[in-house]
Amino acid sequence: MALIVAAGALAAWQHTLGGTVAPHGLEPFQGEQMIWVGPGIGPVGVGGDIAASDILVVGDSRVGHGFHLSIANRFGLGRFGTIWGGGTETAFALLPLMDMPPRAVVVCLSPLGLIGPQNDKFKTLLREPHPGYDATASPRAVREWAAREVQVLTAEGLSEAEAGAAIDWWVKRQRLARHRWLAEQRWFDTVALDKTWSYELDRWRALRLQTIEPTAWQQAWFKRPNFNVSSAVYRQATNASKAEVQRAAAKSIVGRLGELKARGWKIACVRLPVEPVLRKIEDESGTGALLASIPAMTALPYLDLGSWDGATLDGSHLAWPGADRATRAILRWLRDDLGWRH
Amino acid sequence: MVFDSVSFWLFFAPLLLGWWALPFRAAKGLALAGSLAFYGWWNPLYLPLLVGSAVLDYFVAGRIAATERASTRRAWVSLSLLANLGLLAAFKYTPLLARDLGPLLGWTPREGLFDEWVVPVGISFYTFQTLSYTLDVYRRQLTPARSFIDFALYVAFFPQLVAGPIVRARSFLPQLERSPRWRGTRFELGLYRCVEGLFLKMVVADNLAIVVERVYDGNVLAQSTWSAWFGTIAFGAQIFADFAGYSGIAIGLAMLMGLRFPENFRAPYISAGLSEFWTRWHVTLSSWLRDYLYISLGGNRNGAARTHVNLMLTMLLGGLWHGAAWTFVAWGALHGLGLWVERWLRGPRAKTSTGRPSGALGLVRRVAAMAVTFVFVHITWVFFRAKDFGVARDVLSRLFTIPWSESAAGVDTSLRFAVLLIPIVLLHAAMLCRDWFGLRTPAWLRGVGAGLMLAALFIVRRGEARDFVYFQF
């Protein structure tokens, strides 16, 4: 009886309110590591074991939401790892590769990767390696750093609430990363196993069902896709006044890719899909053409996945079903068109 | 391993099959091996502690039962008390004692010395279980277990191992003497309890935590008075959903295996007094404290003054059992004070009736008493949840700011989260109907409820996966 009621309730949900709710996405940074990139740039997020990976996927937050490591690792092309940062310039995200032995990399190009809209005040937070990103830092070190950093940020002009929220974000990420690091020190990484299974269950659910996220209840009952915020961000990032900065960033990416290529790296470039409304903004401003010119200048293969309607959380970050589709599309392209083999 | 993880259910399914398919002796061996694996999943380094505690109490109880000499019996039981409480104190209270009492003795621990201190999961629970066994044997209320496997299974049985309910040997060991009979209705009820428990934990408690954290882990002074109250009531609901959810799953798992565990929660927020509250909240702990601490101290047998001292001591130690922080002691002290006041108002012999009040006046009095108890319990929760007295002070100052005064303005938490309180209200209403009118939930309604909760488990995402609150105790 309970199963019949549950099935009925789920079907009713899917055919009524469920259709109006935003699909849910990957949880970036959940238990992931961060690595320090450089002064003023700060750390970038790392997914998987990048030292042991055969293929790395590099980019901004679109990678964190849009590329499924669990699918990629089972595809038969070898072990994958990701390096990405929210709003991080692609040239910066490529920095950790410069010291690595050559292998393969997929570079995901994005407008924000040409100009990270970082708040200057937050650059204070990123001026030096801090315990907030270090999984091995003790709780005491994090506590002391957090107290110090709130004072620094408020002195820079942030309100106490803004500073507190920024530091809380780091403390929370550090706690997750530390939890994971401690688990890895044990005889058997049971936490990783728990995480993998619950991830797979969550993925299974996300591909079949619209879910409710109570974290959004502070604003509205149902988290609906809202492209207005993203549109404003992208309009600003692709504004004509940014053209010079964008060109300089593109040049810097081209330089780094050229260097990697010369050192024997196998490289492919990808543009992940976004909603049509954002794609229009990106293309009309000329940013799309600038992105496409990067692989052209370095004679690298390029896959543009175009615009996908209703596939994202907010216009630019893929929700779970969209990420599933995009990941498989990239993997097939690498295997079938580029002939990448493990 | 935790009940709300996929790993647990992948572990439990084959174990359940083995439990019913194997001969009973082998099934008990399997359950014991499974229980040790369940505990070792967290950290196998602490398994020897659990096994050592079981071996010691098995041996001590045997020695107590083997002699009639009072002094020898006393010596053995003292050894058990010393070893068990010593272990608990060493792991749980060393940082607190070192930090707060060390300076009085001329030693100040260096900053961060205890940052990496680990308290073995469930030590408070299994220590109390093994102690109750030895004390029962000492009091001649129980004959010692004949088989070590049975006793070890009693101590380490995975459903209750890390967060209770605190099961007594005298109710559990007899169940291991013969193979349980499979009954469809009990199995069904066990499944229902598991679904209900998971729903309470993953849908209700983990999402109410969003509201609670806004108040208790953020800047509470930036919140409105209304938000501070909402956050505090949400915490009362969160801790109930979390712990009653865990206990419910434990009871359900035992039912699926044909065993019985005592109930741990009976809709505590319909209590019309603190003494009634403690017969409804964490019942297995309060009855443990009553039987082995309060009564051992003399209970109410030595006059009013001594009774009050015993009550206060029991509540203070009950508070300290929950955590090594003075805020927990303050929480226990407030409950102790509340119990004093209640005894003074009602008289020492008055008993609280949980049945339907007679007449309109009786109903009004009962509802008023329920409201006063609800508010008092929630004010005491402030000390339970706040990470230190500073936060408790800030929350209390926010709670008691006059709502319409200028300084009370602040950020409001959305009332939408109140929808998560509905299942808790329904659970309490169902218990009230049972107490007052003898109405029980029919099987079909349970089926519908389970179906809806199952659907909610699929649809509603949890704020962020959190450990069960009582794991830390």
Image: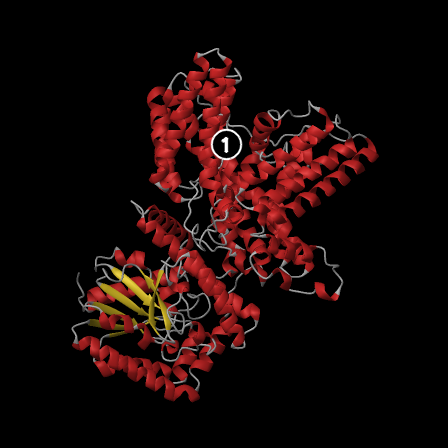
Residue lying at the far top of the rendered structure: B68
User: Residue A269 or A161: which is nearer the viewer?
Assistant: A161
Left/right placement of residue B219 relative to residue B89 reads right
Task: Report the residue that reaches farthest toward the front.
Answer: B106
Q: Secondary structure at mark 1?
A: helix
Q: Position of residue B282 (x, y in %)?
A: 58, 35
Q: Is residue A308 above or below residue B97?
A: below
Q: Is residue B437 visible?
A: no
Residue corresponding to mark 1: B251
Q: Kindly identify which chain the residue marked by label 1 belongs to.
A: B
Q: Is residue A221 above or below residue B152?
A: below
Residue type at numbered disc 1: Ile
Instruction: Give residue A275's position: percent from left, percent from top.
Output: 42, 71
Q: Quadrant of the N terminus of chain B?
A: top left
Vertical side of B103 occupied by A168: above or below: below
Q: Badge 1: few (under 14), some or many (20 or more) residues near its Cα, within 10 Å?
A: many
In this picture, residue A219 sits left or right of residue A56? right
Residue B302: x %, y % from top left: 69, 23
Q: Nearer the viewer, residue B439 or B345?
A: B345
In percent of width and height, residue A112 lies at 39, 76
Of B312 and B465, the residue lying toward us: B312
| Total labels drawn | 1
Q: How is the image coloured?
A: secondary structure
Q: Does B140 sit above or below residue B116? A: above
Name the residue rendered at 17%, 77% in the picture: A262
Residue at the location (42% across, 42% down)?
B2
Q: Nearer the viewer, residue B32 or B188?
A: B32
Give the residue at x 29% y 84%. A251
Residue depicted at x 22% and y 66%: A334
